[in-house]
Image (spheres, coloured by chain):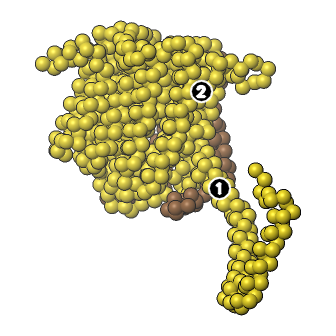
Amino acid sequence: MINEIIQYFVLHNIPPSFVMIIGSIIIPFTKRYFRLATVSIISAATLVYIWQLVLVIEVNNTVQVKVGDFLLSPLYVHPYTLIFSTAFCIVAFAAALYGVAQSRSCELVAGFISAGSAIGVCFSGDFITMFLYWEIIALASCVIIFSSKEKYAGKAGVRYAIIHFFSGVLFLAGIVAQIYLSGSSQLVNLYADMAILFPGFALDMNGIISWLMLLGILINLAAPPFSAWLPDSYSKASPAGAVFLSAIVTKTSIFVMIIVFSGTKFLAFLGMFMVIYGVIYALLESDMRRLLAYGIISQVGFMLVGVSIGTDMALNGVAVLAFVHIIYKALLFMCAGSVMNVTGKSSLAELGGLSGAMRITTFCAFIGVLSMLAAPLTASFVSKPLIIAAAKDEGLMQTWFILLVLASAMVLPAIKFQWFLFFNRDSEIKVSDPPLNMVLGMIFLAALCVIPAMPQFTQFTLYKMLPSPVEYKAYTLEHVITDLQGILFSAMAFFLLLPLLKPSKTITLDFDWFYRGLARYIILAFFKISEVPIQFIRILFKKLIRQSRYVLHSTHGPGSVMARSWAIGTTVMWTIVMLGVYLIVYYFSGGVIFPK
Amino acid sequence: MKKQTSGKSIIIVWILLINFLGATIVAGFIGNISTSYNFEGQVVFDSWYGTIICIAIILVAKFLGFFLKRQESYYKEGRND
């Protein structure tokens, strides 16, 4: 029967995103005990349908639907559709399993809508469909943040909404211009040329379109200076909400970058800057979830370098790294969320020494951290080196060297998270491992961090989802040894300078200071300055009123000239005088007082 | 819950680090590691450059921290202005 249902969906070209989005509507109506079964069925059905669909529709083929004057492609199989949509499906299930007992139903629904829309983006063949799903992701993410019971989540949600709707406007402007100029809404590969920034070059309309779209996507990617929304909002979401957010938003943007902007060279510099920026801010952070959020920026920067290289090997590396990153980052957010759930704290300055009490969480976090380090036998070990090797193959010696350096630097936040949260000093907080559903979620993702990375499984799991065969051999003696040396010596640097890295009860100013700090001061200063003329006008007005009252009172008030009772004789005399004046004027004006 | 002292944990970490580092360095000498670039052929290249870069980044982060760190109540989220 299941096969028949799938065949029916395939025959009627129903996008896989519909399965997850419409299926999520059932969640609030199911009892809490059956919610796990519901989310499992929805996720499994979507995943099976995706894999069946990709078999039926070949890569770079599409199903088109005419809507008004536009030809939409809601079912287009890109080369990397399968790997990204599979990752979104898996993490949606894992996040729902993790939060099924603790999260509000609206949050789970929003999470599934967000994941379903991300799948929709993966299957979009035109800009209009992609944009619709893009905005649904933004809306659903706002709901996830607003659903949180964390302090000040509402304000973080408002900031998130403003930034993402702004990015949507930029993206839409680029899309509208693209459709207007080209006459088609089909997805094309664009190239954002740096030339548009330099004087002397003609202002190219194609360049403007590219830049509008690129800026819109870069904001979603948390590229500096539009990066502060990520740690701001992810740290305010609930434990399960943060898992959804960490997997969906930025990785969807990476997918769009692969489709639309692969090969854009200057992205390499931006990506490298993002890696360093993410690492430095992660080292400065005390909040464990903000630390992980900056880790996301760092890893996304690494992927951006791969996108800029643009070769098959580089893009394969980006896709596999994105898949792996979705899994292990979700795992790390789960571990952080578990600690928050049982301790009620999120600052590394107040936590520590939890490894004895939260053994399962510590172990799962350790697996996640090893993945982040790209240690052997973890999924990152077979993904990150693809990008580095692609740079080497292209003869990009400087890029290759910088990527090696950056890969070493990315070790630091991972070790900081693990060390200060689970080891270091004993915070003397009496806790235990979190509830069973949270533990199961963590174990599920920890297994996925390791099993596909086994030498005998990689070709049949991760690499199988790629459009072209991967010739790269990860498990060579050279690679294992150099990788271990890089990690261990970077760890040595961390422990050598450990006293400098102790977390403190502080926050770190980021680019959001410009609109949360500076803008507030400017507006307050504006109001203070504008009080001066307003006060002046107020005082002047009061004086005028007072003077007018005095004059009126003195002329028309009780006992004043106009209010006095006059004698009859005086009244008659003045009446006669006024009439006399009127007669004289009338006589001398020829009988015309007011000419026509 | 078993108490763990920071000092004891660090000692264990250093012992493990030194042992594993030594093992990888020895393995690096024994194994036939091919290189494409001259500078990579230096002794334990991956080791020393990673350490130096990480030390540099930590020092830069510490330096930036003097300018960027503020009290937790800096943004005063509780007020309504």
Q: Which residue is mark 1?
A: A523
Q: Which residue is mark 2?
A: A212
Please state the chain letter of the residue tagged with numbered disc 1 in the rendered image: A
Q: Position of residue A316 (x, y in %)?
A: 47, 17
Say which mark, if any, is on residue A67.
Answer: none
**Residue nearest the observer in this picture, A491 or A207:** A207
Three-letter amino acid code at the position of disc 2: Leu
**Residue nearest the observer in this picture, A454 or B76:** B76
- The quadrant of the rendering that contains the N terminus of chain A is top left
Crowd around label 2: few <14 · some 14–19 · many ≥20 (10 Å): many
**Secondary structure of residue under mark 2:** helix
Which residue lies most toward the left here? Answer: A1
**Secondary structure of residue under mark 1:** helix
Q: Position of residue A424 (x, y in %)?
A: 46, 54
> Relative to residue A24, is residue B73 depicted above or below?
below
Chain depicted in brown: B
Please state the chain letter of the residue tagged with numbered disc 2 in the rendered image: A
Q: Residue at x 65, y 56 (%)?
A: A523
> Relative to residue B6, is residue B28 depicted above or below?
above
Q: Give the distance between the C-alpha atoms of the residues marked 1 and 2, in whole angstroms.
A: 29 Å
Three-letter amino acid code at the position of disc 1: Ile
Q: Earlier in the sequence, mark 1 or mark 2?
A: 2
